[in-house]
Amino acid sequence: MAAKRFFQRKTVWLVLIASVLAAGAIVFFRKEKEKDSLNVPLGVEQAAIVTYSGPPVAVTPYKWGVAVNVRIAKVSGQSGARIYDVRYIVNRAGTFDLKDYLTGEDGSALDGLPSFKFTGDPKLSKNLDARIQETEEVRVDVGGYYYATLTALGVFWIVWLLLLIFWGRAKPPKSIAVQPEPTIAEMLSGFLAQLNAGTLDAEAKAKMEMLLLRRWREELSLAGVPMNAALDAISRSEKTGSPLRQLQDWLYRPATKIRGEEIAALVAPYTRETRQPEVTDRP
């Protein structure tokens, strides 16, 4: 039942995501650019690239108080047309058309010259970025439901990708319980069993010695003390000094008269877990 609900939620999310992406794609492909006049700052020279296939173009004669100063900086040619690098400066606010300031070299009017409108805006006078815009209109019309087909394919690809990622995905493995590390008392219990059975080898004896030293350091609150200083304090303690000497004689002096039963009796009290004192509130 839980798996069915999970599948239903997954399907709803996939359909929702696909719908949003489809709507965004349709808006993106069908959005048309608005053709507004270009805002330019006053007193700053701007540039426009004019492509014209008619007769040679020249600037109209200068008149005092004209709103726009125009000059042709460079002329280059291509097959069937000329490319003019036109520079202009707007002197006052208003909307103007660049083609009104261009004419034929013989003074005749130019037919088919592309329109290039711009607006002089005094608010943009601090913006000194040059603005260059092509006046030749470039438009590509694609038929046959191209954009609709492209949108549908994009949505299909996204849905397929989401299904590929999430469909039939293996469930995460169940968490494995981590077994706690054995305590000092538990490890000493194991060594004590080996000692009683007579199977305690040299490596196990060394480990048992280190565990007893750790236990004695805890009892004497010597956890942060260096080992040499802690060993000296353990040997001088009335509580741990005698057990330490007895253990070392048994480990390092083969001719000692200490028997394994005595060491077992020494280790046995430390195989029981120490209980922390309970703190009770007194009235």
Image (tube, helix red, strand yellow):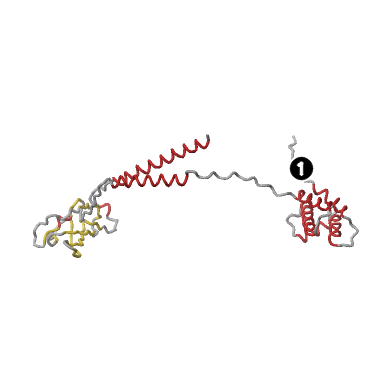
The residue at which mark 1 appears reads as 277
Residue beneath the point at 44% across and 39% down: 11
Residue toward you, 157 or 121: 157
Left or right of 281? Residue 91 is left
Q: Quadrant of residue 60?
A: bottom left
Classify 10 Å Cα crowding around label 1: few (below 14), some (14-19), many (20 and above): few
Q: Count the marks: how many?
A: 1
Element marked by disc 1: loop
Provide residue 126's location: percent of width, then percent of height: 29, 56
Left or right of 205? Residue 58 is left
Q: Quadrant of residue 204?
A: bottom right
Amino acid under disc 1: Pro
Left or right of 272? Residue 67 is left
Provide residue 102's location: percent of width, then percent of height: 14, 58
Q: Quadrant of the C terminus?
A: top right
Pick out the residue farthest to the right: 257
Provide residue 134's location: percent of width, then percent of height: 23, 57
Provide residue 189's location: percent of width, then percent of height: 79, 49
Image: 181 above or below 12? below
Residue toward you, 83 or 25: 25
Residue beneath the point at 23% across and 54% down: 138
Residue toward you, 11 or 82: 11
